[in-house]
Image (cartoon, rainbow, N blue to C red):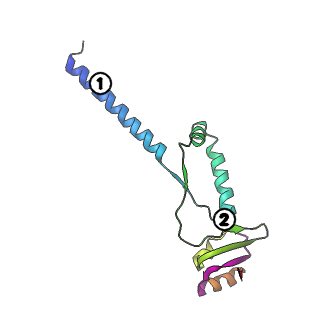
């Protein structure tokens, strides 16, 4: 038979373990899953990712109940705002660099630039090399 002190230690250990498990579960539920959506291709990729996650019934339930939160990645770089079916993109504002052009989805043949978009000289050279036409929008 257990004495009183042994019983207390056992109860304390059980409570400690349960509290620790609860904290871990709460931390996992509060974890935000980030997504980078800069264009239609990224959105389609994200949708496919969510569908694959939903194959797991536990994760599906978490998504449906809001316990599997998603957030957009913070990105201060220039974003292609839209990509059309004919391979053209629209950039409203920001600085378009050589790196920006390297990250464009495959198949982009032209970029329509808004009045706030600025293109660096290296980006102009890179666009020519990639065969991407840069078109300035007047409005």
> What is the quadrant of residue 55 in the picture?
top right
**In this rendering, does residue 136 appear at all?**
no
Residue 29 image point, x, y percent:
48, 43
State which quarter of the image contains the N terminus. top left
Residue 130 image point, x, y percent:
69, 79
State which quarter of the image contains the C terminus. bottom right
Rendered image: mark on residue 39: 2
Residue extending farthest front = 139
The CA distance from mark 2 to mark 1 is 55 Å
Judged from the image, the secondary structure of the residue bearing numbered disc 2 is: loop
Mark 1 closeness class: few <14, some 14–19, many ≥20 residues within 10 Å = few
Q: Which residue is drawn at 54% across and 48% down?
A: 69
Q: Residue at x 25, y 20 (%)?
A: 7
Looking at the picture, tell me which residue is in the foreground, 3 or 66.
66
The range drawn in magenta is 105-122
**In this rendering, does residue 93 appear at all?**
yes
Mark 2 touches mark 1? (CB < 8 Å): no
Residue extending farthest right = 86
Q: Which residue is drawn at 37% across and 31% down?
A: 18
Judged from the image, the secondary structure of the residue bearing numbered disc 1 is: helix
Q: Mark 1 points at which residue?
A: 11
């Amino acid at each position: 038979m257990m004495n009183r002190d042994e019983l207390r230690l056992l109860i304390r250990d059980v409570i400690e373990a349960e509290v620790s498990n609860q904290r871990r579960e709460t931390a996992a539920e509060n974890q935000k899953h980030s997504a980078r959506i800069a264009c239609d291709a990224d959105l389609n990729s994200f949708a496919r990712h969510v569908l694959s996650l939903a194959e797991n019934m536990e994760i599906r339930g978490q998504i449906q109940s809001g316990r599997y939160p998603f957030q957009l990645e913070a990105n201060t770089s220039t974003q292609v705002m839209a990509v059309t079916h004919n391979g053209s993109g629209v950039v409203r504002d920001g600085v378009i660099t050589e790196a920006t052009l390297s990250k464009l989805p495959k198949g982009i043949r032209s970029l329509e630039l808004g009045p706030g978009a600025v293109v660096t000289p290296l980006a102009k050279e890179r666009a020519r090399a990639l065969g991407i036409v840069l078109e300035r929008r007047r409005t």
